[in-house]
Amino acid sequence: MAEVVSTETAAMNLIANSGDGRSFAFQALEAARNGEFTLCDQLLVDSDHAIKKAHQAQTELLFSEAKGVKQEINILLIHSQDHFMTSMLANELIKEIIRLYKDKKEAR
């Protein structure tokens, strides 16, 4: 079971890992654009791993709340949630774009 963490710590973990996940996803897109699919695939793995770490930070907040520890809602927490959601969306959409690049390469 996750330990109780401060809202600020969880928010910063969300921001840092979400940002890494988004950056890796965009790097993967660039690699796919350049036909570097081995690198692309590794960057997607890195992106997924970072997003998973961000999700774990969010889960820590949920567990804490479930244990009765009320979370302070502040701009940092809201900002972290924005980062997390946009990173997840970027990761998913970029994977679809990369599939198109791969399909295009296979069709040649």
Image (cartoon, rainbow, N blue to C red):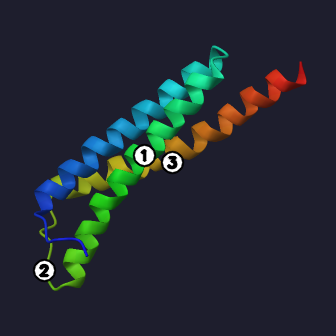
Amino acid tagged 3: Leu
Between the residue at mark 2 and the residue at mark 3, the CA separation in whole angstroms equals 29 Å
Residue at figure coordinates x 75%, y 32% from the top left = 100
Amino acid tagged 1: His
| Coordinates of residue 61 in the picture (x, y in percent) | 23, 68
Instruction: Give the quarter of the figure containing the C terminus.
Output: top right
Q: Is residue 7 left or right of residue 13?
A: left
Asked if 59 appears above or below 42 in the picture, the reply is below
Dot 2 alpha-carbon crowd within 10 angstroms: few under 14, some 14 to 19, many 20 or more: some
Label located before the other in sequence (2 or 1)? 1
| Coordinates of residue 79 in the picture (x, y in percent) | 25, 50
Say which residue label 1 marks. Answer: 49
Q: Quadrant of residue 94?
A: top right
Dot 1 alpha-carbon crowd within 10 angstroms: few under 14, some 14 to 19, many 20 or more: some
Between the residue at mark 2 and the residue at mark 1, the CA separation in whole angstroms equals 28 Å
Asked if 27 appears above or below 94 in the picture, the reply is above
| Coordinates of residue 15 in the picture (x, y in percent) | 26, 45
> Tag 2, which secondary structure?
loop
Residue at figure coordinates x 50%, y 31% from the top left = 43
Dot 3 alpha-carbon crowd within 10 angstroms: few under 14, some 14 to 19, many 20 or more: few
Label located before the other in sequence (2 or 3)? 2
Asked if 94 appears above or below 81 in the picture, the reply is above
Residue at figure coordinates x 12%, y 68% from the top left = 72
Residue at figure coordinates x 22%, y 50% from the top left = 13
Say which residue label 3 marks. Answer: 89
Say which residue label 2 marks. Answer: 69
